[in-house]
Image: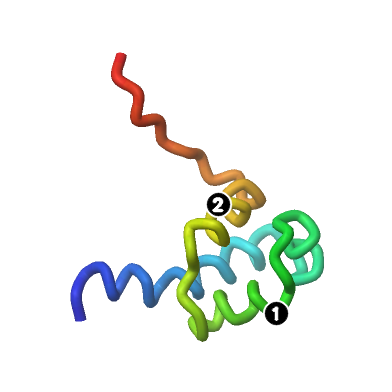
Amino acid sequence: MTEDEAVLQNVGPRLRGFRKALGVTLTDLAERTGLTPSTISRLERGHIRPTLEQLLPLARAYAVPGRSNQSS
């Protein structure tokens, strides 16, 4: 398994961990992100790989800071 594959394999459990730590239900998170509860559940269980379009609203919901690519 490559390092990238290992990272992708751990995305689901990490997403679930963030949600559980915040005490947020699938339904609550779905309302915040515009994703369906089913999609979030499948992402968390690793049944589907996340797309950027799915990860961006999840990152916003979990207040994960973004990175700037701008030079000083």
Q: Quadrant of residue 45?
A: bottom right
Does the image show residue 23?
no
Question: Who's the residue at 49% across and 81% down the image?
Answer: 46
Q: Quadrant of residue 20?
A: bottom right
Q: Position of residue 69 (x, y in %)?
A: 34, 30
| Quadrant in which the N terminus is drawn | bottom left
Q: Identify the coloring.
A: rainbow
Specify few, some or many for label 1: CA neighbours under 10 Å numbering under 14, 14-19, or 20 or more. Answer: few
1 horizontally vs 9: left or right = left
Q: How far apart are labels 1 and 2 at the CA level?
A: 17 Å
Q: What residue does disc 2 label?
A: 56
Mark count: 2
Does the image show residue 58?
yes
Q: Secondary structure at mark 2?
A: helix
- Tell me which numbered mark, 1 or 2, is placed earlier along the sequence: 1
Q: Residue furthest top?
A: 72
**Which dot marks residue 71?**
none
Q: What residue does disc 1 label?
A: 38
Instruction: Indicate the amino acid at tag 1.
Output: Ser
Q: Secondary structure at mark 1?
A: helix
